[in-house]
Amino acid sequence: MSLSMSSFTRTSQSRSAADLGQTFGPPATLVLLILVAGISFDNFLGGANLSSVAERSAFVGIIAVGMTYLIISGGIDLAVGSVAALSGVTVARFVESGIHPFAALGLSIAIGAIIGLIQGIAVVRGKLEPFIVTLAGLLSVRGLALLISDEQNIPLPNDGLAKSIGSATLLSVGGYEITVPTLIMLVTFAVGAWVLRRTSFGRSVFAIGDDERSACLLGVKVDRVKLQAYATSGALAALAGGLLAFKLTIGRPFAADAYELQAIGAVVVGGTLLTGGRGTVVGSMFGTLLLVVIQTMINRMGLNAFWQQLVSGLFLLVVVTIQTVLQRKSD
Amino acid sequence: MSLLDSLSLVSDGSEKHQRSNRTSIADVARRNGVFIGVAALVLLNIIITPNFLAWTTLRLQLQQATPLVFAALGMALVVTTKGIDISVGAVMAIASVVVGLTITTVGWPFAIVLALLAAGLCGALNGALVAYLRIQPIVATLAFLVGGRGLASVLVDGEFRTLDNDAFALFGRKFYTLPFGASVPLSAFVWVAVAMFIAWMMRSTPLGFKVRAVGANEIAARLSGYRTKSTILSVYVMCGVLAGLAGVFVTSLQSASDATQVGNLVELDAIAAVVVGGTTLRGGEFSASRTVAGAHFVLLAESTLLRNNVDTALTQLITGLLILSAVLLASRLSTSSRES
Amino acid sequence: MTNSNPGVTPILEIASIQKRFPGVLALDGVDMRIMPGEARSLIGQNGCGKSTLIKVIAGVHKKDAGSIRVLGQEVDVRSPSHAVDLGISTIHQEVNLIPNRSVAENLFLAREPKLGPFIRQKHVVSEASNLLMQYGLDHIDPKMPLHRLSIALRQMVAIIRAVSQDAQLVIMDEPTSSLEAAEVEQLFSISRQLLREGRSVLFVSHRLDELYEVCTTCTILRDGKLVYDGDLHPMSKNELVATMVGRDSANVDEQATGFRKRPSMGDEPLLKVDNLQSSDLESGTIQVGAGEIVGLAGLLGSGRTEFAEALFGLTKGTRGDGALEGQEALPKSPTEALAQGMALVPEDRREQGILPGQSVRDNLVAAIMPTLTKRGVVDKAEVDRIVEKFVKELGIKLSSVDQPIETLSGGNQQKVILARCLSLDPKILIADEPTRGIDVGAKFEIQSRISDLADDGMAVLLISSELEELLEGTERTVVMHERRSVAELTGDSLTENRLIDMMAGPESSTQ
């Protein structure tokens, strides 16, 4: 019972250029950039700088994990920045009213998950474009944050546990420090990657993004998985926003501005296709770090934040174009 | 199961029946809801907003609507081809900066021309990515949303540049006094003219026809002999030029070019205006009048709340929810007209 | 319950199933019963409702009326996963797998072996290896992404997934359309194994030979109705085709044709291609002369439409000799094709023809619009004149030319599409199933219009799955089989039996 080899000719063991680029492009580029920066700038590879790069990546990085799930499943969440801001505000309000900081963070994460779930329901039950739904979310959740904060910054304690959650150093080796946000980012990436690869939820996310109709025919519970993905994205955005508030010791309604773009950018640069069905959480981590390293380098060159924007946009353009061209060749 | 049902409808041999009356009522509601909405907001304002009918209030409304009307018209053109352009705000900023950089050397008329050219070029870049590289519209324009404002800022080092050009400032600020105390801003004449021109173009030129055809059914358009790629490209160019016009107007109104604030988040309002106007995101449909009405609805909703001392926070929250309900309503109405 | 074999409960028994889609009754009171160990074939023309029937059984579509009993229990199949729970697994017509995931994942998606919340990754891979080995596909690495496999191997993976679900009934909808001989043989042996285990198979295929290999009983549908239910083997292949296309009964006389017998014109061909090839076409040869209607026949999947698309410049990378009269080569795009005087009425009116949401007027002038301008502005008077002319000429029934195209009946929609082509005054008209799914009156009108056009010197290539149409309408018909043009029938040889023989396959034409 063996088959003719003719039907096997199109099967090749080698991985396509698109796959290779997708997997190894982001880390290779990251290493290359860090090397170049290390040669070009003093102390770039030093503990102070790299620790700060890691910590500054933490907030967008945590959001990028949820965004990765959504984008792989063919959705998107534009409301993450607003949810993060709302979470910062609610954390501050809770702590202000005497609630334990951990409980405050937990409650805020629950609120974020509920907001995500509501968006998910609008997408799944209302059959609306994720883009439009979360666009409305972006506007109204930011409004909610402004409302709850009375458009004022709400101070958080600058000492004790609250301060520690935002900035305590957990581990320091030769000046290379891991602070709480950095650790939480690393844990989120690790768990996020694990869930995507090793659970039915993760498998379903891929299947839906790749071919929703087939996934449904194969017995995947499409609606439930989508709701879970939106809730996860909301919860992670709230986690990032809460941590940011603890770090800045302030709940700021205008915080996390344009984080949705940074997170989407990080996911795309990390090799996840916006057409859905392909991508990795680990890639998003490299994407996040890449964007922060580029910003740091531009900063070191003495150029301002505008150059950071310009270069990030160009970088995104180049990455998307390369992805599309490679993809077309391999298909 | 409705997902599967809709995806795997048998296409061969299906004989579409006449639509029932009920559904055409839904369709009429979707198409005219925005006018009723604007009328309702105007009525509400007459009742609750002090001095709403004063010409100073009305003309301010007409003037402030200008940039959004331009941006929304451009967005509506792109949406007609099933696309989207989230970079209109960044393109506005680039246009503003180009005016600021060139006005002293080439004079205001050429500065405007150069700004519109630059904006058209930005649109062409977006359009090329969408039409020729087949990158999803939202991704293609995302890069420009991120990078475009950076480019604008880099060109002027992020400076807010005051322009000292009275003639140019008139475009944004000039009012005409008409009989009976009526006072109308020059810019209102401009956006009315532009909207009418686009409405005419979409109705009466082959290009407008092709744009609708490509959005309605790209395969059928190709079989009818259209070069669909160049049609898509041209739509993004037009969207860019219109965003440029919006940027030029804002620059004139504030007599200053500004890379960081001009057009900030306009893309959101523009998409909202198109959607509230009842235009389906499924493509093939365009209405200048409904898009203009949609832009006015979005602005009126915001200004109604603000004028009545609702704070910005609540205003933003309510606006967001209003957009969502408009989309939901429009999608319900258009689904019911398709399903039966 | 009526049971021919008392004591044995049918695995599946459906009765009076109805399913309506907007404007069409896809299934009209269909009955079917499948016993344990039975291999039943389900056949019918394209659009006869067999795919719809399968989707109703598989939980993709909800039935509108009728009953479904599984092992004697009346059930309401809610979803595809529910169907699997009921013991019905389905291999759908298009491969419904996830292209970018591994073979192993595809085999076990939504039923992964787990330890707590986590998938037992190694287990999935080893189970997949076992399955692949069991079915002789051990040369496939289970970790390989599915899209790297050939279409045929993907189909085999889908088959293995379906049969490994312990289903009592395995439905196979055109499982062999992308398989080669060796794999087809493999599929047969898998099927026979299932039958020996007392499981049942519902088999759909347009390759009639295969049915005899596996199946014992047969259900034939036509226009959503059951037209045959019984044993397969007493029926010859030609009888099957005749029953499918409905040529044997009295309704032959009911079907008035709008075609007239016309003398064959031996003119220089306007279109001449020799051994045209593309990715979907192995070899296509045809000539069409001025004033001639040439037919293109073939069963579903025979390559008829692919041939037409290659001629019209829709397919990239076509090879072969051919050109329109006075041209160097075949058009490379539809734009070029239209400019060279070739027009196409596409097969799928909804997907490729109409511009939904646009008015009848805009749909009708879509192709000619760019030329109807005065100083860059559309000449509305000229547009209206053309619309009025064709509405009258083709008898398009409408209340206003401003009404959206979808509000017309299918026949009138088709006339608008035909008018769109004719407005360009083409020399060559390719009409792909121009009368499919439209009412008798409109059909007659379109057919007689096509005859008129040929009388006026147009070269017409008529693609049809209705033998009637080809026999009445054409002087010469080219038959496609397995993506090749295999025969050209003219004059006395253009008979119903010859057509049926050649469509069923040239090698089997001895009967």
Image: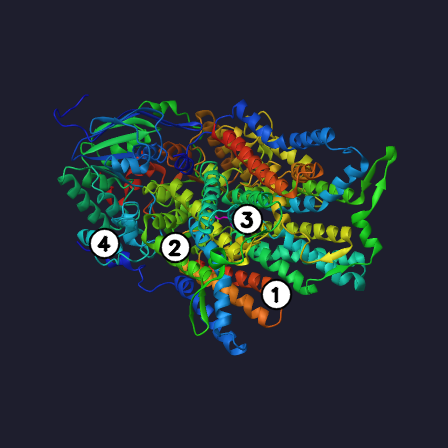
**Residue at the image position 76 percent from the left and 52 percent from the top:** B254
Q: Do badges 3 and 2 share one subunit?
A: yes
Report the residue marked by disc 1.
A307
Amino acid type, callout 1? Trp
Q: Chain of mark 4?
A: C
Cα gap from disc 4 to disc 3, whole angstroms: 46 Å
Q: Chain of mark 1?
A: A
Q: Position of residue C211 (x, y in %)?
A: 22, 39
Q: Position of residue B238 (x, y in %)?
A: 65, 50
Q: Residues within 10 Å of mark 2 (few under 14, many from 20)?
A: many
Identify the disc placed on residue A89: 3
First of labels 1, 3 by sequence position: 3
Cα gap from disc 1 to disc 3, whole angstroms: 30 Å
**Residue at the image position 25 percent from the left and 31 percent from the top:** C219
Highlighted range, magenta: A76-83
Q: Chain of mark 2?
A: A
Report the residue marked by disc 4.
C123
Q: Chain of mark 3?
A: A
Image marks 3 and 2: residues in contact by CB distance under 8 Å: no
Amino acid type, callout 2? Gly
Q: Do badges 1 and 3 share one subunit?
A: yes
Q: Position of residue C247 (x, y in %)?
A: 32, 29
Image marks 1 and 3: residues in contact by CB distance under 8 Å: no
Q: How is the image coloured?
A: rainbow
Observer-side mark, 3 or 2, equals: 3
Observer-side mark, 4 or 3, equals: 3
Report the residue marked by disc 2.
A192
Amino acid type, callout 4? His
Observer-side mark, 1 or 2, equals: 2
Q: Position of residue B9 (x, y in %)?
A: 41, 35
Position of C117 relative to A326 (above/below): above
